Image (tube, helix red, strand yellow):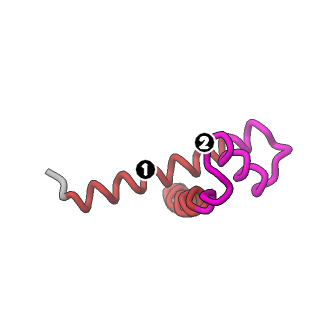
Amino acid sequence: MDSPRGTVTAVSEARQRLAAGMLRDLMKQNPALDYEEARRELAKKLGYKPDTRTNLYKLIEAGEDLLNAGEH
């Protein structure tokens, strides 16, 4: 059985990958959006309020690092 800490880490990484993947998908669907516009649009779609969007942005940044590390 996984340790609770290992499970928390796995869930956190999954959330990070999901957020980054959703941003990539949104940018593919709408190439007219630049990176910042796409982040704001995703935050709106997910119901983040302006004062909590930085939480999503941190998830995206960490997820991008994980996704990029997996591509190498």
Task: Give the spatial CA distance, label 2 vs label 1.
Answer: 16 Å
Residue 34 in the magenta stretch? The answer is yes
Q: Which residue is drawn at 53% across and 55% down?
A: 67
Magenta stretch, main secondary structure class: helix
In magenta, the rendered stretch is: 26-54
48 is higher (above) or lower (below) than 72: above
On the image, which quarter does residue 29 sit in? top right
Left or right: 55 in relation to 50 = left
**Residue 72 seen in this snapshot:** no
Q: Position of residue 7 (x, y in %)?
A: 27, 54
Q: What residue type is labelled 1?
A: Ala
Residue 60's mark?
none
**How many C-alpha atoms fall within 10 Å of the one at disc 1: few (<14), some, or many (≥20)?**
some
Foreground disc of the pair 2, 1: 2
Q: Which amino acid does label 2 sit on?
A: Leu
Q: Position of residue 42 (x, y in %)?
A: 67, 45
**Residue 38 seen in this snapshot:** yes
Residue 16 in the magenta stretch? The answer is no
Q: Where is residue 41 in the image (x, y as percent from the top left)?
A: 73, 45
Q: Residue at x 46, y 50 (%)?
A: 15
Instruction: Please report whichever mark, 2 or 1, sits nearer to the chain's N-terminal start.
Output: 1
Q: Residue at x 21, y 57 (%)?
A: 4
Left or right: 12 in relation to 29 = left
**How many C-alpha atoms fall within 10 Å of the one at disc 2: few (<14), some, or many (≥20)?**
few
Residue 46's mark?
2
Q: Name the residue under label 1.
A: 14
Q: Position of residue 53 (x, y in %)?
A: 63, 57
